Image (spheres, rainbow, N blue to C red):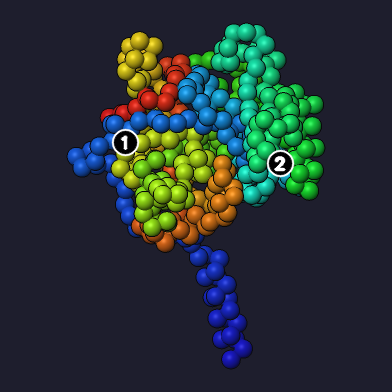
Amino acid sequence: MIIVMVLLAVLRHSSSLSRPEPATPATKYSYQPDRKTYDKMRIVSLHRYAVKGLSGDVATTMRIDRHDGTFEDDRKFALLYATSGDKFDEGRPSWLHKENFLCAFTAPELLASLETEYTIESRSGHGTHHDAKDSTDRRLLTVWNRKLGRSSTPLLGPIDLACPKGRQETSRFFTNLCGKDVRCVVASSSPSNYIIGNGFDKLPPNLHTHQFANTSSGVKNNNGDTRTVHIVNRNTVTQFSDAVYGGNSGSQGKTALTATRFRPNIVIDNLEPWAEFDLIGKTVKVVAAMGKNGFQNQDLYPLKFRIVSRTVRCAGVGVDPLCPELGVIDIPSLLVKHFPQHGPYFGVYAVVERCDNFRGGEISVGDTFRVVDD
């Protein structure tokens, strides 16, 4: 009898060890150009989050230069818990789970109480693109109390994150704010594990080589590169919001979910809800809006993104970063409840297609995405 009980215990233990992670939704996604329209996707907003977990900055145009793998300085800095300090090497950085940082995942309500602004101040006077930037360009972070707004005295800054002194002061501020020892960190601009490629033999100054990304999708799907771009479909947001709030969300004073809750880099529309999942494995290119620079010529804007994975959601999006007073909602559970065929996924990750002849490009509000034929 004892032997039988032991065997049963062993079997139960083995089963728990081998138990798979939550199953991928049964829905099969496929590109269906004969049934859906994909080539009218329009860029409606662009966002950059220089410090992981803090509020983003809105842009009308973002340039991705030849060495870039994401928007300039997107998640370039992070607030690392000192207890995880031994996991980060600025000279040889690797992807770390968000539990190691003070961020929207670990302290959503606290960080949503702050409003921040990040600007790049070029001392050379030649702009802010990598090929023109001086290594002494300033990366200025300013932090306000969200309730008091930007007309109030800043809680911090403007503080220059490009210099160690500025990062130390930022570390002290957030340590005092959250009650845990926090360090503002950034990877070296020329880490030993960065592959230059693209026909270049050296790196420009201030290169953004490592992104403190929320996902390991880049690492898994882009030769170990952590840098990704997060894309959210506004029509999916609307359908999800209507499901949560009983339809017509946002009208007659009703609460509505917004795209910014999901911390996107690019928000698109003119695409059916959830059809962004059909694009996984496909490449889209940026087509300039008519009238941009006085003409439309997609050959002058060779910027392309390869869609690599869906975005699994976590508790970090439970608080609206722009309206924290709305309270906390369980986004993953609501996704599974209302859209079980998709599971707890919302948005897609993409990587920049950087072939040998890639020289960079721009993406602007009003531009469109066009699927590149295989």
- The residue to which callout 2 is attached is 80
Q: Is 142 in front, or is 132?
A: 142
In the image, which disc is placed on residue 270? Answer: 1
Q: Amino acid at mark 1?
A: Asn
Q: Is 183 in front, or is 204?
A: 183
User: In the image, is 74 to the left or to the right of 175?
Assistant: left
User: In the image, is 335 to the left or to the right of 329?
Assistant: left
Q: Is residue 254 visible?
A: yes
- Give residue 122's quadrant in the image: top right
Image point (57%, 34%), residue name: 56
Disc 2 is placed on an element classified as strand
User: In the image, is 149 to the left or to the right of 164?
Assistant: left
Q: Position of residue 160 (x, y in %)?
A: 72, 24
Disc 1 is placed on an element classified as loop
Image point (33%, 45%), residue name: 273
Q: Amino acid at mark 2?
A: Leu
Q: What quarter of the picture does the N terminus occupy? A: bottom right
Q: Earlier in the sequence, mark 2 or mark 1?
A: 2
Q: Is residue 216 visible?
A: no
